[in-house]
Amino acid sequence: MEIITSSDNKLIKRLVKLKQKKYREIEREFYIEGYKNVLDTYNAAKSSVKEVVLSESAYKKYGSAFERFSVVSDALFGKISDTDCAQGVISINRSPEFSFPNADRIIYLDRVRDPGNVGTILRTACAAGYGAVLNNCADILSPKVTRSSMSAILKCKIGLDIAVSELKERGYEVISSDMGGDSVFSCQKPSGKYCIVIGNEAEGIDPDIIKSSDRVLSIPQDGIESLNAAVAAGIMMYALRY
């Protein structure tokens, strides 16, 4: 078995380039890191996986889980890894096609910029049965988003930069999450298609979106100014569905 040890190797150069958004867009590829993350994606959407890369140590532990893979030295893997505690597993995947999500329930992210929040919300949306729209948010295929979303970006129906007005035209009830609204726990649940809007971490939801919303709902809070965007999104999604 050949073990890659040189940073001049074509596969290693390819991985390093994919850390940059412009190369992800040019090559229509992105990478996922972490054993559970990669395995979940591998089992759920094997056709999207183009390459699996294992460190020497990871090969001994996880090699039997994958049909095809390349092995690199532990030292080299440490240099290309995007995490402080690398698990030694990376996959290169085909970028998914993003289009109108066409789901009965949608979570709409308005300028959510923190990659961890975006990834966590997508993971929760997938679990709760929601599609998603990202409006001018953090790059969905960045390493930090893919790491926190697990395989959700390949499982969830996702659209990018779709106007709220289009959702309304397609029959969605638009519900904004804002502190000025009625309690989500005492409101009437939606009877048809609906979209929950979560705003920017610092600025909240665009005022024009709030004005055009069918309803504005809040999460009651005691002794704290606001909730993390991902936490708020999760509460809203489950409260309105179940």
Image: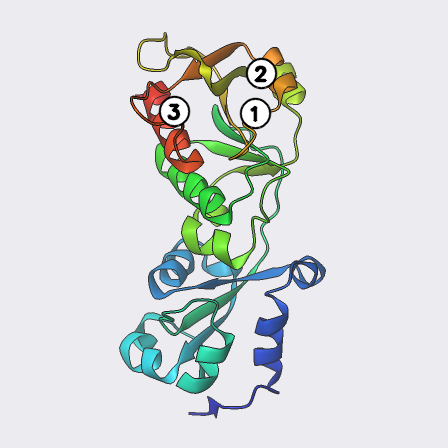
Of residues 238 and 155, the one nearer the viewer is 238
Is 92 situated above or below 151? below
Mark 3, other Cα within 10 Å: few <14 / some 14–19 / many ≥20: many
Real-space Cα separation, disc 2 to disc 3, in angstroms: 16 Å
Q: Is residue 168 left or right of residue 238?
A: right
Is 20 situated above or below 80? above
Residue 37 numbered tag:
none
Q: Are marks 2 and 3 in contact (CB under 8 Å)?
A: no
Label 3 sits on what residue type? Met
Quadrant of res 214: top right
Local secondary structure at mark 3: helix
Residue shown at the point (48%, 67%) measured from the top left: 82
Kindly give the residue lying farthest to the front in the view shown: 223
Local secondary structure at mark 2: helix
Mark 2, other Cα within 10 Å: few <14 / some 14–19 / many ≥20: some
Q: Earlier in the sequence, mark 2 or mark 1?
A: 1
Q: Are marks 1 and 3 in contact (CB under 8 Å)?
A: no
| Residue at which label 3 appears | 236
- Residue 166 visible from this viewpoint: yes
Is 88 situated above or below 236? below
Q: Return the x and y of residue 56 as percentages of the image width and height.
A: 37, 85
| Residue at which label 1 appears | 205
- Residue 129 visible from this viewpoint: no
In the rendered image, the quadrant that contains the N terminus is bottom left
| Residue at which label 2 appears | 210
Which of discs 1 and 3 lies nearer the camera? The answer is 1
Real-space Cα separation, disc 2 to disc 1, in angstroms: 7 Å
Q: Return the x and y of residue 231 as percentages of the image width and height.
A: 37, 34
